[in-house]
Image (cartoon, helix red, strand yellow):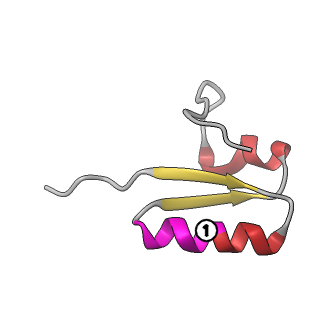
Amino acid sequence: MTEAASRILIIDGDARSLQLMETLFKAEGYVTETATNGEDALHAGGMDDHEKPHHLWR
């Protein structure tokens, strides 16, 4: 059985930065979801209302 890939949500208002980070994380084996603002991030990836991010970085 293979281990499931870790998911990461990338939020950035700058499209070029968002694309770069997505490319880098995918290359490391992460499953990525992207959003350009906080509101979109809360609804990204089909997260349930009770789910919260494990790490925040800005």
Residue 27 location (% of width, % of height) = 45, 73
- Residue at 84% across, 43% down: 39
Q: Tell me if residue 24 is in the magenta stretch.
A: yes
Q: Is residue 4 left or right of residue 46?
A: left
Q: Nearer the viewer, residue 37 or 44?
A: 37
Magenta extent: 21-28
Q: Is residue 34 left or right of residue 15?
A: left
Is the stretch drawn in magenta largely helix, strand or loop? helix
Q: Nearer the viewer, residue 58 or 49?
A: 58
Residue 13 location (% of width, % of height) = 86, 59
Q: Quadrant of the C terminus?
A: top right
Residue at the farthest top position? 50
Q: Name which residue type carries label 1.
A: Glu
- Residue at 61% across, 68% down: 22
Residue 5 location (% of width, % of height) = 36, 56
Residue that mark 1 sits on? 22
- Residue at 40% across, 65% down: 29
Q: Nearer the viewer, residue 33 or 49?
A: 33
Residue 40 location (% of width, % of height) = 80, 49
